[in-house]
Image (spheres, rainbow, N blue to C red):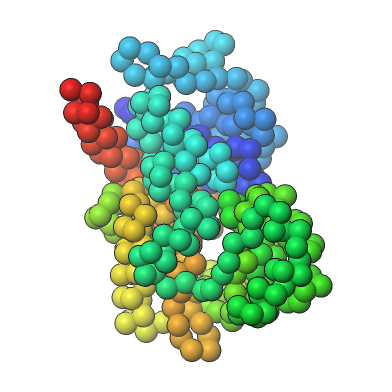
């Protein structure tokens, strides 16, 4: 039986969400016929080998452990035990988890892993880089500009760019963050300073994005470049001002999730096609959730973002959308592990050829 290290927790603002995702994945990895070995990454970055996933951070035991490269592979070793690792399934949301850094560590250690590779992970985590890739590939998106470094202090200049570009309302977002952490809807110049100050706590590059009245549509995608499968299109109807962290995780009535969006068949086909084109544009592997905006006024479709490490909680859209499409949690988890193994073997062969 293949042993799968399930890496969760992490040092980002999405720590708690990661623990919940890992609780669900521990079950699906086992149901798919693998042996899950939970590894909790504490907020200080230290790894701790667990008997079972702790759904809450405080539920995880102190048991420092680390990967160790050996002659015939990699082992996870603690002070009292060791186990050979065949595969890694990272579900560390946010920075130092889905931004390419953890993926790079697995590459160096020689461990096959689930999900997108280093470059794809890094590009899709950084909203400014991701938007630039969309532009190069002709992917429709809402208007935006990037605020970086000392520009965050010049509120008058930012206000002028908003007014001359697309007007209020706007969304201020950290470029490198997920789960809507640090995201603010701003309706006037008077709200800019506080929104920017809070978003800048998480990143020194911010996105200022046109705020349209939209429907939020989502689709799940999986597979290795360029062959993908997609789910149907779901919709999130938000009961807050926008789909904030509170609406997603804290308020049980914050949003209503619909696994089959009430949209025309032609629009669903367009979303499937555009999702495939966008994931291919960033050379995506593994799995992702791709989010779209549908303008309520004119019906224009915009791609919002590609999330290469989406939530795997029981209420998360990625697993639910594939379940609605006939793929159980265990089935899609098994396929993700198989795709990660195939990708690893392909890269090993390429690197071996480069050394010959």
Q: Residue, x 75% and y 63% (percent of image)?
A: 154
Q: Residue, x 60% and y 69% (percent of image)?
A: 209
- The image quarter in which residue 301 lies: bottom left
Q: Residue, x 58% and y 66% (percent of image)?
A: 145
| Residue 262 location (% of width, % of height) | 44, 81
For the N terminus, the image quarter is top left
Residue 95's place in the image compared with 244, above or below, is above
| Residue 182 location (% of width, % of height) | 69, 57
- The image quarter in which residue 55 lies: top right
Residue 287 visible here = yes
Residue 279's place in the image compared with 80, above or below, is below
- Left or right of 151 in this view: 87: left
Q: Residue furthest bottom?
A: 297
For the C terminus, the image quarter is top left
The image shows a total of numbered marks equal to 0
Q: Residue, x 35% and y 52% (percent of image)?
A: 284
- Left or right of 272 in this view: 298: right
| Residue 220 location (% of width, % of height) | 40, 60
Residue 202's place in the image compared with 69, above or below, is below
- Left or right of 196 in this view: 141: left
Residue 258 visible here = no
Instruction: Please tell me which residue lies in front, 85 or 347.
Output: 347
| Residue 282 location (% of width, % of height) | 37, 54
Instruction: Please tell me which residue lies in front, 189 or 329.
Output: 189
């Amino acid at each position: 039986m293949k042993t799968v290290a399930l890496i969760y927790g992490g040092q980002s603002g999405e720590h708690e969400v990661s623990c919940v995702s890992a609780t669900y994945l521990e079950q699906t990895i086992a149901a798919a016929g693998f042996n899950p070995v939970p590894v909790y990454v504490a907020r200080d970055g230290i790894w701790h080998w667990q008997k079972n996933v702790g759904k809450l951070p405080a539920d995880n035991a102190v048991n420092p452990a680390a990967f160790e490269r050996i002659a015939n592979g990699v082992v996870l070793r603690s002070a009292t035990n060791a186990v050979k690792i065949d595969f890694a399934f990272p579900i560390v949301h946010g920075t130092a988890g889905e931004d390419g850094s953890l993926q790079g560590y697995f590459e160096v250690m020689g461990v096959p892993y689930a999900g997108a590779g280093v470059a794809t992970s890094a590009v899709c985590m950084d909203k400014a880089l991701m938007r630039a890739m969309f532009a190069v590939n002709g992917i429709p998106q809402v208007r935006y500009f990037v605020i970086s470094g000392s520009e965050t202090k010049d509120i008058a200049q930012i206000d002028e760019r908003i007014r001359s570009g697309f007007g209020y309302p706007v969304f201020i977002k950290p470029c490198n963050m997920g789960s809507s952490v640090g995201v603010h809807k701003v309706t006037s110049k008077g709200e800019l300073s506080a929104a920017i100050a809070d978003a800048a706590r998480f990143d020194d590059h911010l996105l200022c994005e046109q705020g349209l009245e939209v429907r939020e549509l989502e689709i799940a995608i999986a597979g290795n470049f360029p062959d993908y499968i997609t789910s149907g299109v779901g919709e999130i109807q938000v009961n807050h001002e926008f789909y904030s962290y509170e609406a997603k995780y804290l308020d049980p009535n914050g949003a209503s999730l619909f696994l089959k969006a009430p949209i025309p068949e032609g629009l669903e086909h367009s979303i499937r096609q555009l999702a495939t084109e966008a994931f291919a544009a960033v050379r995506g592997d593994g799995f992702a959730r791709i989010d779209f905006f549908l303008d309520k006024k004119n019906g224009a479709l915009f791609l919002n973002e590609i999330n290469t490490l989406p939530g795997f909680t029981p209420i998360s859209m990625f697993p639910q959308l594939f379940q609605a499409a006939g793929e159980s949690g265990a089935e899609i988890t098994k396929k993700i592990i198989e795709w990660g193994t195939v990708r690893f073997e392909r890269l090993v062969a390429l690197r071996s050829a480069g050394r010959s």
